[in-house]
Amino acid sequence: MILVFGSNRAGRHGRGAALDAYRNHGAKFGIGEGHVGNSYGVPTKDGNLKTLKLNEIMHHVVLFIMYAEANPKLTFKVTRIGCGLAGLNDWDMAPMFEQATNNCQFDNKWKLYLGDSKEYWGTY
């Protein structure tokens, strides 16, 4: 199981799901994007910890979805990326993952936005 979390481009995993990814899932300080250990960082903040624009985040989400598609034997547990420290809304973030592959599971709070066609794992 790969924990997918919102990160910053500087790879400073100091709070929220990013800290959990660092402590428990193999995320490394200094690496703010991609698959490391049993984690995958999706940048929602820049290197100065300022929240990225939605179109910039969408670019990183698309890269994640392509990675998940290329790795069908892995299961990705997607947290409510951007909805914590980045201060974004579920209704903006969840629809970015509509095209995610079946090996992605989502926080129950996103079921309202993604519907019954996705798998859910609980609440982070």
Image (spheres, rainbow, N blue to C red):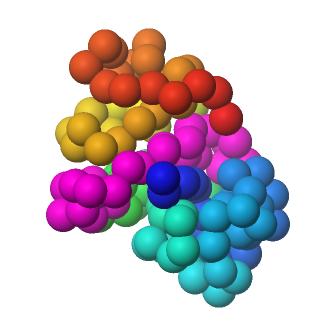
Residue positioned 23% across, 43% down in the render: 101
Q: Residue 118: which quarter of the image?
A: top left
Residue positioned 77% across, 66% down in the render: 23
Q: Which residues are magenta?
A: 64-88
Left or right, residue 22 beside residue 74:
right
The answer to if 72 sits in the magenta stretch is yes
Q: Residue 117: which quarter of the image?
A: top left
Residue 86 shows in the view: yes
What type of secondary structure mainly makes up the magenta span?
A: loop
Front in this rendered view, residue 88 or 100: 100
Residue 52 shows in the view: no
Q: Is residue 45 above or below residue 111?
A: below
Front in this rendered view, residue 48 or 15: 15
Q: Which residue extends farthest front?
A: 73
The answer to if 69 sits in the magenta stretch is yes
From the top left corner, tell me how far across and down residue 92 is, in percent. 45, 33
From the top left corner, tell me how far across and down residue 60 is, in percent. 37, 62
Front in this rendered view, residue 43 or 28: 28
Residue positioned 30% across, 44% down in the render: 103
Residue positioned 64% across, 64% down in the render: 25
